[in-house]
Amino acid sequence: MNDFDPNEVAHQFLLACLNEKLVVDDVVMTGARVRCRVEGDKPGQKSGYYKAYGDGYPNGKICNYKTGGSVVIWRYQPTEQDKDKFFGNQRSMSVTQREQHQKQLEKLRLESEERAQKKAKESQAFLARKAHEAFAEFKATCVTATSHSYLEHKQANAYGIYIASRTLKIVKELEKDPSKIHQYLPNGSLVIPAYNLTGEFQSFQFISEAKQKGAPELILSWHGFTYNKEQKTINEYLIRQIQQRKFIKSFRSEAPKSGSVFILGEGIAQAEVILLCEGYATGATLHHCTGQTTLVCFDIENLCVIARQLRALYPHKTIYICSDNDHLKPRELDHQGKPKINVGLTRGLAASHEINSLAIMPIFPFDTYGSDWNDLYALYGANAVKEQYHLQISFYKKEKCSIFENENRLRLLINYLQSHYPVVFMRVQAQQLQNA
């Protein structure tokens, strides 16, 4: 506990959330991670989250994936009344009072640290238990995959992945909404196990076909949406979106995802070069075309986490951040009329800069659909992936730099690729990266 006004604390954090374009009416200050909508989200989307602590000195984190996915750190700003009550007017204090005041602050700090450590231990124990449950479910439900409609659609090989042999019903312990208490792993889903960097099973991702037959309630519940009897239009919209997307990716609820990867190729310790990417199809493409050990990180936020962990474990290994390049996004406008952010490229470059590595990304003709290495493979074949991969590494070695160091390097990179690979990149424009 503390002496701050809880209403003022919540109000300040709410304003901070609104400033980051989160759509929230109230906030929970318990330290729980809360997913929420952001401005510009479609019905059913939740492209942001926050985590706030009201105990000790109030603080929190805010993230909006639509504006780049960077985590904003928030700390409470005491009012004048708070300062008088909590910090005291130290100028008018005697030496003894000042010492007592400092002891009080130190006691509060230690209590806050103790609570944080206790919560961390409880959270670790909960995640460890959920990882154990996920492993048991995985072993009981999954058989080795040799083919799947998703793999055929992506033209990707099956490397140590699985298929669900029956529908699995998973109970979400922390979910308070009765309509969302169950998660379903549909029979026939492609299942990708996720491990931490020391090889311990953590969770699994499953990819299922979106066009399921059944009642609207069941179709929506399979993908984390709630059926609303009063809002038929929203239900129809969500079902239509699910059917258009063809495949839905989900993670096993409550099992640890952050810090988890799927490894393609030889072990991390033995690998001389390690590639980091987001999705399985991208990872399978990179591993197939380059032969390098590839870590599938599942999303850009986790890729940044893995990059930091990997660099801490292996300071001298060669790591390439194989980020997505959503080059068409800056040509779209958000709800405020501003160009959308090329999130994959922006975060990938930032991650490479943070761990002092190189970021390589697929580059497409300016008016061509595509954002990741699998798209490049599907459009132009394995040779395009191999040539871009090796040409970009050659460019870095020639220039002795990371392209993050200078925006002009982006133009140099495109010119370099155009000169060595003119057919595909004849119409590539430098602005696709400048607008990232």
Image (cartoon, grey):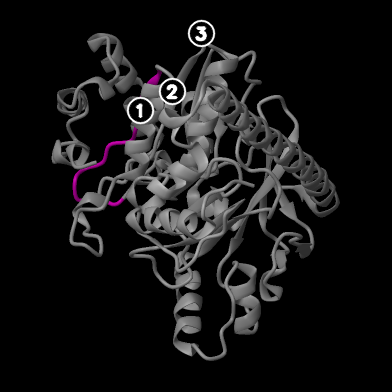
| In this view, the mark in front (1 or 3) | 3
At mark 2, the secondary structure is strand
Identify which residue, 84 or 392, lies in the foreground: 84
- Residue type (three-letter) at the residue carrying disc 1: Ile
Residue drawn at 32 percent across, 28 percent down: 388
Residue at left offset 57%, top offset 72%:
225
Amino acid identity at mark 3? His
* Secondary element at tag 3: loop
Give me the disc on residue 316.
3
Badge 1 vs badge 2, beta-carbon distance below 8 Å: yes
Q: What span is colored magenta in the figure?
A: 357-369
Judging by the rendered image, the residue that carries numbered circle 1 is 360
In the rendered image, residue 275, in percent from the top left (x then y), is placed at 49, 26
Tell me if I can see residue 291 in this picture: no
Residue type pointed to by label 2: Tyr
Q: Regarding mark 1 in the picture, which secondary structure is present there?
A: strand
Report the Cα–Cα distance between label 1 and label 3. Answer: 19 Å
Up-down relation of residue 13 to residue 399 (above or below): below
Q: Which residue is mark 2?
A: 320
